[in-house]
């Protein structure tokens, strides 16, 4: 029998502090697939907010901690495409002047996966036994889709959820306007982009909007709440954990 290595979870800050039920759902899905899961409690931010704001030394300090903590893990999984993109693509950039650290960063990045990417590409598990009898539409996050090339994987998983109707929204891969600090620095532009995204969600008639990154979903949830829309927001891990 092929050995399936244990996985170590890197839980995105926003999930750790605001949406812990997403992490719990991810653990449930993995354990139902007989995957051994661990989650270091001393983990911190990957450094992406600092990196995007130009504070490279602060980001480098966060990256050093991440590498030290996760270096011995066999597989690292995160429920966030933007965080995985940071580790894979920007950590080596941060250590461009330090060949030894850059080598360690590349090695860690190579075994860091976004949740749906790991399920489909590594485990080849498109059907995890989920059942969710609702109408759902999917938002394709920018970092996940454009920088990691992950788009087929979440859709494959969603298509195998029993009793669920997946309704494609217009411009599913268009930005939701979040972009982390972008939503704070350029709030008017962000809100205009978000309004278009929410309009597209409402036009589908879906009861639930899902995606793979809670940054985007939190932003979408905010406007849906402000306009008193009845559409629920759920991370894909929560749908996959439904039975």
Image (cartoon, rainbow, N blue to C red):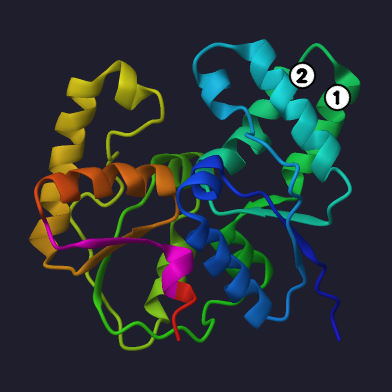
Label 1, residues with CA under 10 Å away: few <14, some 14-19, many ≥20:
some
Q: Mark 2 or mark 1, which is nearer the start of the sequence?
A: 2
In the image, is residue 172 part of the stretch drawn in magenta? no
Front-most of 22 and 119? 22
Quarter that holds the N terminus: bottom right
What range is drawn magenta here? 229-239
Residue 140 vertical position relative to residue 86 in the rendered view, above or below: below
Q: From the viewer's perspective, is 210 left or right of 122?
A: left
Q: Is residue 234 left or right of residue 18?
A: left
Q: Secondary structure at mark 2?
A: loop
For the C terminus, give its image quadrant: bottom left
Where does residue 47 sit, x and y in percent of width and height?
Answer: 62, 27
Work out whether residue 79 or residue 114 is closer to the camera in this orientation and state it.
79
Question: Residue at (9%, 47%) from the top-left corner?
Answer: 227
Res 135 label: none
Q: What residue does disc 2 label?
A: 95
In the rendered image, residue 235 lying in the magenta stretch gets the answer yes
Q: Residue 70, position in %: x, y?
A: 81, 44
Q: Are marks 1 and 2 in contact (CB under 8 Å)?
A: yes
Dot 1: element = helix
In the displayed structure, 201 sits above or below 53; it is: below
Q: Residues within 10 Å of mark 2 (few under 14, many from 20)?
A: some
């Amino acid at each position: 029998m092929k050995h399936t290595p244990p996985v170590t979870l890197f839980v995105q800050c926003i999930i750790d502090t605001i949406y812990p039920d997403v992490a719990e759902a991810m653990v449930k899905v993995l354990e139902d697939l007989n995957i051994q899961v661990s989650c270091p409690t001393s983990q911190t931010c990957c450094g992406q907010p600092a990196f995007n704001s130009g504070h490279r030394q602060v980001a480098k300090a966060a990256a050093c901690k991440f590498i030290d903590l996760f270096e011995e893990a066999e597989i690292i999984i995160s429920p966030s495409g933007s965080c995985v993109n940071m580790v894979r693509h920007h950590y080596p950039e941060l250590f461009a002047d330090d060949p030894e650290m850059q080598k360690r960063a590349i090695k860690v990045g190579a075994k860091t996966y976004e949740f749906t990417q790991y399920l489909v590409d590594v485990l080849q598990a498109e059907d995890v036994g989920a059942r969710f009898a609702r109408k759902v539409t999917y938002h394709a996050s920018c970092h996940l889709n454009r920088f990691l090339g992950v788009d087929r994987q979440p859709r494959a998983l969603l298509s195998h959820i029993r009793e669920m109707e997946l309704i494609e929204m217009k411009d599913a891969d268009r930005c939701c306007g979040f972009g982390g600090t972008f939503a704070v620095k350029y709030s008017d532009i962000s809100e205009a982009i978000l309004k278009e995204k929410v309009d597209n969600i409402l036009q589908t008639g879906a009861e639930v909007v899902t995606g793979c990154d809670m940054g985007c979903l939190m932003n979408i949830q905010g406007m849906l709440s402000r306009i008193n829309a009845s559409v629920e927001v759920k991370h894909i891990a929560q749908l996959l954990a439904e039975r």
